[in-house]
Amino acid sequence: MRILASSSKTTTLAAHLLAADLVSISIDYTEATTTTTSSTSTSTTSTTLAGGPARRAAWIHGRPLPPAATFTPTGKDAQIANAGYVTYNFGAETASTIGTDATYVFRMLLAFDISSLTGKTVTGCRLTIQTGSSNPGTGTTGTIYRITRSDWVEGAGTGTPVAGATWNDYDGSTWTTPGSDYDGSTPTPVSFTPPVGAAVFYEFPDISAFCQDAITSRSGSLDLLIRQDTETLGAHAFNMRTKESATTSTKPKLVVTIPIANKDMDMIARISIVIFLLGMAAPVWAKNISAATRAQVILALKEYCARSAPTSGMIGGLIRHMSGNAW
C-alpha cells in the first residue's frame, strides 16, 4: 500500500492487491480541495472525489466493483477486403470498414493477448469500439466468430499490396477459405446489430464464451473475425477506429471481468479501514472530508464490525469518534 500526501490539501490513497484468486485490484481515492479567490478576496472551496460516486461508494464499503482487466489489440487488427483488394493489406489503417459498399466486401480481424488471465473464470467480456462514419443498411445484422489460427500477421499496409493479412492470405500463405478461416460453432458465434452514427462508442454483446475459450484452450490468444451477415454489395457498412488511432480512448478495448473471492473482499475492507485511520492522522485532509463521505465511512466500519468481532471494540470507538464533532 502506498500513501501519498502533500501540503496542497490533496491526499491520494492507492492500494494494489495481488492474490491467488484474482489478477489485480487497483483502488484509488482522491479527495482534493481547491480554493479560488476572486478580486474581492472572497474564497470558495470545493471537494472532488475521484472515480465517480458509484466506484467511490463501492470502494468505501469494502465491496469493489468486479475486478476487470482491460486489453487493447496486441499488435494485430486488420481489415481485409475482396474483389480488387484480395492481395491488399490494411494493417496500418487508423480506421477500418465492416460490411459492404458498391464494390467490395470488408471484414475485420482483431487479436487480444489475455494470457495474463490463465486459470481464471470469466464472468464478463465486453468489446468496445468507436465508430468513424456509419451507415448500416436497413435490417442488417453482424456476427463475431473465432478465427481458427492465431498466426495471422497484421501487416503495415494502408490498402497496399504488402505482406500481412489479406482476403487471400494470413502471412503469405493462403487461408483455407478466402476471407479468413473461422469457426462457425465453437464458441457459439455472437450476433450484433451494427452501430449507427459517427464517432459513437459501441459495445458489442457479451463475448465471455470467446474469452473463456481463449484462456482455457488457446493459451490466451483471442482471435476474432467481425463481419456483417448480409454481404451483398451496397451501403451496408460501418467504420471503426483501430489500434493505430492517434487517440488512445478511441482504440478498440476489451474488458474482461473475473470473480473476486470473499477473502479478498475482507482484505479490501481492512485496507479501507487502515487508510481512513491514517487519514485521521492527517488534519488537513480530515478537516476537509465531506459529511456525506464521513457517513459512508461510518457505514463501512459498521459493516466490518459485523464481520470482525475481535476488532469490533476498537472500531466501535472509532465510529463513536467519527459520529461526533471531532471531525
Image (tube, rainbow, N blue to C red):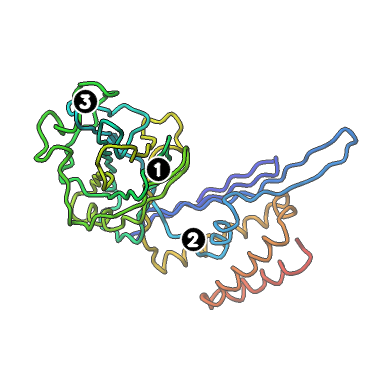
Left or right of 31, for residue 201: left
Residue at the (76%, 69%) spot, across then down: 324
> Which dot marks residue 88?
3
Residue at the (35%, 56%) spot, across then down: 206
What distance separates the C-alpha of mark 3 from that of mark 2?
A: 47 Å
**Mark 2 surroundings: few (<14), some (14-19) or many (≥20) residues within 10 A:** many
Residue toward you, 86 or 282: 86
Q: Earlier in the sequence, mark 1 or mark 3?
A: 3
Q: Earlier in the sequence, mark 1 or mark 2?
A: 2
Left or right of 233, for residue 306: right
**Mark 3 surroundings: few (<14), some (14-19) or many (≥20) residues within 10 A:** many
Left or right of 306, for residue 243: left
**Of labels 1 and 2, the one closer to you:** 1
> Which dot marks residue 68?
none
Q: Which residue type does callout 2 highlight?
A: Pro
What is the secondary structure assignment of the residue under circle 3? loop
